Amino acid sequence: MPISYIALLVIVAVSAIIDERTTKIYNVITFPAAALGIIVNLMTGGVQAALMAVAGWFLGALLVVGPKLFKMDKLTTGFGDAKLMAAIGAFLGPGGVLLVFFYYSLAYGVVSTYKMSRAVPWKQFFRLFKTFGPDNMGLAKESIDMEGVVKVAKSKIALGPPIAVGTLLAIVLQKQTLAFFGFHSTQLFGMPMILPAILPLFFF
């Protein structure tokens, strides 16, 4: 695995831990990470790779900020998450950040479903369902305490961990995923869809 991938995984892992504990992802992590991704691709792949990295940075930010602009996602996204996704795009390029966003969406769905399922008072639900039967579900619904479910539905989910999981899966499963979606060629404008830049050893 290229060293740049390892560096990116460390960055997203640290961001995920911080986001889980503080619900924030700080600029001191995301901005240097984005700059590093662009510089690394410039040094290892030339100007064309750097331009792909910049395109990945813009696309990563747009994927998260775009829904907010159209008022589709007011509660669950923050600009720290957008900056982290942009930094990922700077490392992996447009194709890479799209794969990360795909797996991030799946991971987010799993996390949100798990949290919601834990909040549902299943014992009350099945007890009332058994008592009233399917013909009286209106009565059962009114008798179930849904306060916990409403509270979880309104709570914010830290996006750092799902983004970190999405990044790992996108890196590990990139070839299989591209093949699954029918991309027999992994080239985009003469460059790899997922930039495989190798971090020069003198950076250490």
Image: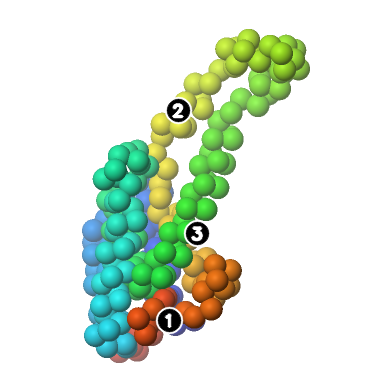
Q: Which residue is mark 3?
A: 103
Q: Residues within 10 Å of mark 3 (few under 14, many from 20)?
A: many
Query: How many numbered discs, if any?
Result: 3
Residue 21 % position (x, y): 39, 47
Looking at the image, is mark 3 or mark 1 nearer the viewer?
A: 1
SS category of the residue bearing label 2: helix
Q: Residues within 10 Å of mark 1 (few under 14, many from 20)?
A: few
Query: In the rendered image, is residue 22 in sight?
Result: no
Spatial CA span between label 2 and label 3: 26 Å
Q: Amino acid at mark 1?
A: Gln
Please name whichever residue, 161 or 195, is drawn nearer the observer in this view of the structure: 195
Residue 151 is labelled as 2
Spatial CA span between label 2 and label 1: 46 Å
3 or 1: tag closer to the N-terminus: 3
Q: Amino acid at mark 2?
A: Lys
Q: Quadrant of residue 181?
A: bottom right
Q: Is residue 138 left or right of residue 78?
A: right
Callout 3–callout 1 Cβ contact below 8 Å: no
Residue 78 is labelled as none
Q: Which residue is mark 1?
A: 187
Q: Amino acid at mark 3?
A: Tyr
